[in-house]
Image: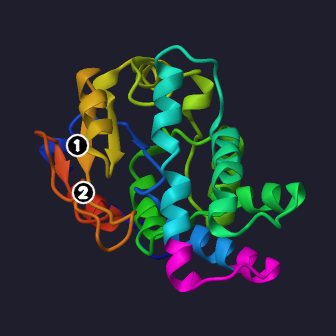
Amino acid sequence: MPPTKTNNTKAPPAATGVRALVFDVFGTVVDWRTPVIEAVTAAAQETGAEGDWSVLGRQFADDWKAAYRPAMERVNEGAPWINVDAIMRQRLTEIAGKYGLDGLSAAQRDALNEVWSLARPWSDSVSGLSKLREKYILSTLSNCTFRWMVAMAKAGGLPFDAIMTSEQAGRYKPAPEVYEMAITLMGGDASGLMMVACHNYDLVAAQSHGMKTAFLPRQENGPGQTTDQEPEGAWDVVATDIEDLAVRLGC
């Protein structure tokens, strides 16, 4: 009988006491921009929209995503709840004419909006998460809707043990209710949770609630992105990607 495989790697100090990792998803775990560019370019070709869509596709994706944060901030300031599905669907209607996509029917726009649930894992995400899962409980903690997050995880083969989203808290990160929800659902010990994100603001908020933090840079907004490429706080771990995070956490 072959010997039982054991992992004798000692967990580094940064991982001391950590039982679970909670992940931001858009940008951190998945590439949302490439599928959006591909989907809107295909829609433009289908409807005969004019222009150079090798350029317009990228512009449209960025313009579409631009509604994301302001709409969430309005909710956090007291506006009625609106989920991300509806935020992005409203924005699609607002900007379609600007790009010559007036010809898209309501059904076509609904279908195009679903591309957000098909954001694809970065090349290191599935393998890195799989290694981390051998030692830690893994959950999302995303501003995405629960429905889209489940679809994204299933389509991308993302090995999360749990799905948590801001929708369940009725507020958006970095509102305190979101992190408090995660801490409560994971047993109440904030120091046993590590927030993993490519956005410094997310880690600032998590750290203020006693959670541990891990930062990794992503160029989610394309190769010209200059924000969130360096750690801006005293984070417990700084990694290059999720595979590197697994190594740094002793997996």
Q: Which residue is mark 1?
A: 15
Q: Which residue is mark 2?
A: 250
Residue at 59%, 63% in the rendered image: 119
Amino acid type, label 2:
Gly
Q: Is residue 80 above or below residue 239?
A: above
Residue 186 showing in the rendered view: no
Magenta stretch encompasses residue 57? yes
Residue at 44%, 59% in the rendered image: 129
Amino acid type, label 1:
Ala
Q: Viewed as shown, does residue 99 lie left or right of 127?
A: right
Q: CA distance from mark 2 to mark 1?
A: 8 Å
Dominant SS type (magenta): helix
Span of residues in magenta: 42-58
Marks 2 and 1 close (CB-CB < 8 Å): yes
Q: Position of residue 86 (x, y in %)?
A: 70, 39
SS state under label 2: loop
